[in-house]
Amino acid sequence: MFKKFVYFPFLFSASLYSTTTFAQQAIPAPPSAEDFAMADDRSFSISDDGKKVAFLSGDEKNSKLVLIDIDAMDEIPINLGDTAKPRSVFWADSDHLLIKVSFAYNADIGAKDNNYKYEISRTLSYSLSTKKTAIIMPHPDLENNTSLRISYIDKKNKKIIVLGLTSDIKDREYVVFGYDDKLKWSLGAYFADFNSGTGKNIVDGNVYTDDFIFDKMGNPRLRIDVDVKNRKATIFKLIDKKAIKLLEWDNVKKLPFEIEGFIDDKNILISEDEKSNSRLKTINIENGNKSDFIIGEKKNILNIIKDPYTKEPIGIEFDDSNNSFEWLDEKLKKAQILLDKTFAGKNITIDDWDEKREKLLVSVSSGNQKTHTYLFNIKTNNAGDLSLFPDSIANYEFPVKTYEKFKASDGLEIPVYITRPKNPNHKKLPAILLPHGGPRARDDDDFDYISQFLASRGYVVIQPQFRGSTGNGIDFENAGYGEWAGKMQTDTIEALDYAISKGDIDKNRTCIVGASYGGYSALVGIAQSADKLKCAISFGGISDLALMQYTEEDRGGGLSGSVAYWREHMGVTRYDSAKIHSISPLYMVDKIKSPVLLMHGTDDTVVMPEQSQKMYNALKRAGKDVKYIELKDEDHWLSREKTRAQFLKEMENFLAPILKPQE
């Protein structure tokens, strides 16, 4: 690997990163499905002393944790054994790594014979000095121990503060997960030891407690209670564990803002929706007074970046077309300015830093180039590329993804990303309409392996940011409520019309492809727009919205936030059969005239495989052209290289005879 880990003066890094030299070479054949499916090295993290970098390599099934000793310029693979699917890695201190893993668990809960699977997340602590691994907050019923989240890391005392739910468990060292409303789960905070993983209770909430807020020293200072049933939200000050009411709201289902953390001993930073955008303000916890927090331009806020140890807010990511940043920390602010100049036209993210904030891990990406991670030394202005890709990926000139906008039929401006393959003969090309999942999500101008795979096969790829997507303000995001199979769908189809109007697409060779909500949109699209679309592919898509709501209720309890959200976003409950059936693809089968490919992971814990199975059976009974493929041991996110490659190949083989991209 270290043949790629080469330091260079940062002043010249832009020319080294440039892809302009490709124009002077013969264009190589496109990468294979296996190359596109290959998992990138990911989750880079630097130790607090700045001497080591850790990251995950390989796919989720065969991941390995790799440690780079910066001074020795060497890498040391660390075998963690069977740890399910490693998702991320982070340094707790210079000796301990925190590794988040997950696995699908078939829980014996819910209604009879429902056989649900849950994606269970755990955090492991790995010591470099002892080479031992500990489970954070162990429990005899390991499979049911989830819902734990880290709120603070105390490096000095080698402890982690975690939050988790408890019910009638007598042993307060353990936290377990529950689903039943009747069990009256309550939130508690615990100190967990780096080495043993076991924890001790710090403070308890009640059945309404939604969160605790800690200050920079790890002291619990605020408790947030939300009573969904009685529509009340309350902030309590915690003084010697005694709760004193600070602020309260009636007729609400959550706090009217997000608490981002303490900025000093007396003030918390909040983000609040205001005039279609999210704005920053402060609240004084002594008197509850609110004040404006002014920083930079007035842009919609996407995310507050926090110190990984203390959770103190130190930066702001804005929700614009390229996700720009504003840092509260002066060192990171200066580094961002230099990075933006050096890698002009690229997307730059400062991902991690050492305790002195002198050595940074920086991601640099664009729509036509995979993400490179650099180790950047602020003091020396040197950077080293930690990334390694197969030659077929590194040497291939991927097409550029463009950001465009069009007016929907009702006048709303809709963004769309379009990736156009190289077309030297200027012929009309087939096109793929690729709506994203969510639906409260977005595409961006980073590298996307599915759209680039399709473009490399000769398809124009259209990614509509339909109303309901994030990234365009609160009003645009909220406009998706109640628009399932409605305006979210018409925006998607009108994005295709817009792209066709540009003149380089053959309108008679178009298909729709999507995953999760995008899979739902693909199935609705092939039914509602049968005259425009020649085929559809759905991976992990929803076919029956009533069944989805029932499943969420049975898995999480009728009072869960997830159930309330889906009812509100769909604009209908499962009890209104006529309305919910009218927007469910399962009940649109008679309108489908073109071939459909359904794929689903057997370990999908977000959308149950039953959704695709029911759609397949309905299409088959109706005599439609349909194929169903189950991807063994795959989850909702296509985490495994083998099945990811299978997905790409099946998609390619299904589309090619219908759309004929080589003509």
Image (cartoon, grey):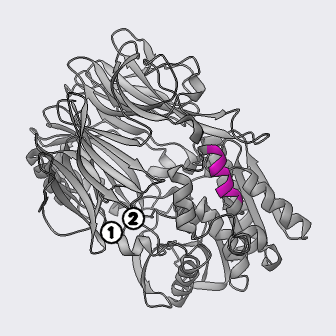
Q: Which mark is residue 321?
A: 1
Q: Which mark is residue 188?
A: none
Q: Secondary structure at mark 1?
A: loop
For the record, the magenta segment spans 547-555
Q: Is residue 551 magenta?
A: yes
Give coordinates of residue 350: x percent, y percent. 25, 47
Badge 2 crowding class, 10 Å Cα cut-off, few under 14, some 14 to 19, many 20 or more, is many
Q: Residue at x 31, y 58 (%)?
A: 249
Badge 1 crowding class, 10 Å Cα cut-off, few under 14, some 14 to 19, many 20 or more, is few
- To which quarter of the image does residue 71 belong? top left
| Residue 260 seen in this snapshot | yes
Q: Would you say 259 lies left or right of 483 here? A: left
- Whichever of callouts 2 and 1 sits on the residue coming sooner in the sequence is 1
Give coordinates of residue 624: x percent, y percent. 86, 71
Eye-nearest disc, 2 or 1: 1
- To which quarter of the image does residue 173 belong? top left
> Camera-side residue: 414 or 432?
414
**Position above or below: 137 against 369:** above
Q: Is residue 546 magenta?
A: no
| Residue 662 seen in this snapshot | no
Q: Residue at x 63, y 50 (%)?
A: 553
Q: Residue at x 67, y 33 (%)?
A: 107
Q: Are marks 2 and 1 in contact (CB under 8 Å)?
A: yes
User: Looking at the picture, which amino acid does disc 2 mark?
Assistant: Asp
Q: Which mark is residue 445?
A: 2
Q: Secondary structure at mark 2?
A: loop
User: Looking at the picture, which amino acid does disc 1 mark?
Assistant: Ser
